[in-house]
Image: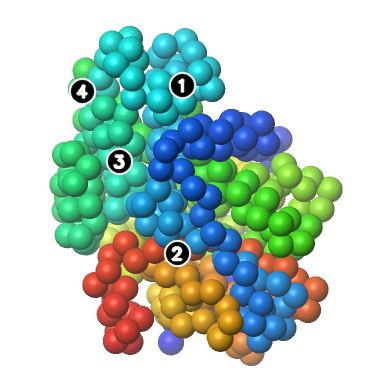
Amino acid sequence: METIKWAVNHLPKTEDNQLSIMALDNVTKARTFHRSFPQYTQTPLAKLDNLASFLHLKGLYIKDESYRFGLNAFKVLGGSFAMARYIAQQLGKDVSELPYDVLVSDQLKEEFGQATFFTATDGNHGRGVAWAANKLRQKAVVYMPKGSTQTRLENILKENAIATIEEVNYDECVRMAASAAANTPNGIIVQDTAWDGYEDIPSWIMQGYGTMALEANEQLEEYGCKRPTHIFIQAGVGSLAGAVQGYFANRYPDAPPRVIVVEASEAACLYKGAVAGDGKIRIVDGDMPTIMAGLACGEPNTLSWDILKNHADVFVSAPDWVTRKGMRVCAAPLKGDPQVISGESGAVGLGLLMSIMMMDEYKELRDYLELNEDSQVLCFSTEGDTDPERYKNIVWYGLDK
């Protein structure tokens, strides 16, 4: 069985200029925007007391994004906020002046016109962009990498978007989307991968993800947990991880939680950067065959990489069996704990936590992280069963994919 690999963060620190992206005021503004949508409800924070006790932890909480806007994943938070901020920028307004009812109005359509939002996705981000564009009466074009499932393609097409599955990997699809946007009148790429010269929209996407972190933080407090001691967060390009890390570093500057960043082993670009130790990004090429499709990204977001270099505790490379374990435990909880329907890219954090707590070969990591009876652990299940057939194959039938 392929093993979990991990690297303590010994990366050289920078001036930490990107942490301000996730300043609390920015995140609050994003949450206010999301609350203006008629479809908005706060997603649940599952409190797994019995599993926490079984793992010898004080508390264990999972943010369940399968309820987000009826889209079964968190990604829409980033795409919708970035699109609103782009429209606001073009009109010389602040995004606070453009709540949902204004964005969908005839007056705004007349004032702004119509843009075409291009993106690359394995499914969840593209579905979120397509949904938001559809609701906001804009256009969307979506490129999906080789290996994307028909189910995820059809979910995007249902939102009146143009979508295709290409014969290249995710990072090549990003380049295709950027090129198409550059050659389309009023075309704009909405991607959480930042590169030199393309940083505004990725930063706005990260702020949109902050809504999820802010909700979780408030829900923890309602449960009587003053702050999490540990956060397990998954990473593809790292935007989500940087957003969650950035929010909690700003929220608890004097006593930040320990953050464990976990990637699919086939696409572990952040982990490879941590192992190299020089602070430069590392890129993973090729097909990246992992069931964690949402994490199959080989080129880091430069903005979030800077945040993670300065604040993350440990970077982990996890094989697919880790997320399969997390999916099954979420689906069949201990009696009295709530069930969480968690998909392949959603359950790897819990699968990693369980492996660290239950398997002797990871005792060194358990000890280093000081995971014990005083630990309050927060995980994020970022998607539900976005590919229902694959979900059943793994959870019901015990298959690998």
Q: Earlier in the sequence, mark 3 or mark 1?
A: 1
Residue tagged 4: 183
Q: Earlier in the sequence, mark 4 or mark 3?
A: 3
Q: Secondary structure at mark 2?
A: loop
- Give how far across and how far down residue 285 sits, in percent: 34, 56
At horizontal 68% and vertical 36% (from top left) the residue drawn is 24
Viewer-nearest of discs 1 and 2 = 1
Residue tagged 3: 131
- Give how far across and how far down residue 128 sits, in percent: 34, 44
Name the amino acid type tagged 1: Leu
State yes or no: discs 4 and 1 in contact (Cβ < 8 Å). Answer: no
- Badge 4: few (under 14), some or many (20 or more) residues near its Cα, within 10 Å? few
Q: CA distance from mark 3 to mark 1?
A: 18 Å
Name the amino acid type tagged 2: Gly
Q: Residue furthest front?
A: 38
Residue tagged 1: 98
Residue tagged 2: 346
Name the amino acid type tagged 3: Trp
Q: Is residue 53 visible?
A: yes
Q: CA distance from mark 2 to mark 3?
A: 20 Å
Q: CA distance from mark 4 to mark 1?
A: 28 Å
Q: How many marks on residues?
A: 4
State yes or no: discs 2 and 4 in contact (Cβ < 8 Å). Answer: no
